[in-house]
Amino acid sequence: MAYLLKTEPDVYSIDDLERAGETVWDGVANPQAVGYLARMPVGEKLVIYHTGNERCAAGLAKCVAVNAENPKTPEVRIQFVKKLKTRRTLAEIKELKLFADSPLVKQGRLGVVPLTAAQYAWIVGK
């Protein structure tokens, strides 16, 4: 499994994560998305997705630490891995049967989205 983390690129982009190297992923309010963060295993593969006008998968990261002592506000530290050579747009994703049941398509406002191994592989171009 993997997760897709949504962010407004003018607030925090894949370029910002690359410069910082690591960051705490916060600002997630939806209870379902917070639950995904609280249960996220260290080492989990992550896709950084730009919302707003871009609407595309922009890069990769990994989960390096989770503090879920308070499950309502888990502290998840992520680390930059790389930028995607080919950004995958939401329009492309919506065209694929592979994502038909994905919360990325069905629950557009969800800030943390689980991905199957096949979905992750398609996004990263494997």
Image (spheres, rainbow, N blue to C red):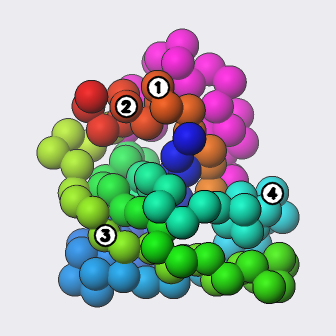
Give the amino acid type for the residue marked by disc 2 in the picture: Ala
Q: Residue at x 69, y 53 (%)?
A: 110
Q: Residue at x 48, y 67 (%)?
A: 63
**Label 4 residue SS:** helix
- Label 2: how many residues lie within 10 Å, few (<14), some (14-19) or many (20+)? few
**Number of numbered discs present?**
4
| Picture quadrant where residue 36 is located | bottom right
On the image, the x and y values in percent for residue 24 come to 51, 84
Q: Earlier in the sequence, mark 2 or mark 4?
A: 4
Query: Mark 1 — residue?
Result: 118
**Is residue 9 shown above or below 52?**
below
Q: Is residue 94 magenta?
A: yes
- Label 3: how many residues lie within 10 Å, few (<14), some (14-19) or many (20+)? many
Query: Mark 4 — residue?
Result: 32
What separation in Å lies between label 2 and label 1 (alpha carbons)? 5 Å
What separation in Å lies between label 1 and label 3 (alpha carbons)? 22 Å
Could you tell me if the residues under marks 2 and 1 are in contact, i.e. CB atoms within 8 Å?
yes
**Label 2 residue SS:** helix
- Label 1: how many residues lie within 10 Å, few (<14), some (14-19) or many (20+)? few
What separation in Å lies between label 3 and label 2 (alpha carbons)? 18 Å
| Picture quadrant where residue 28 is located | bottom right
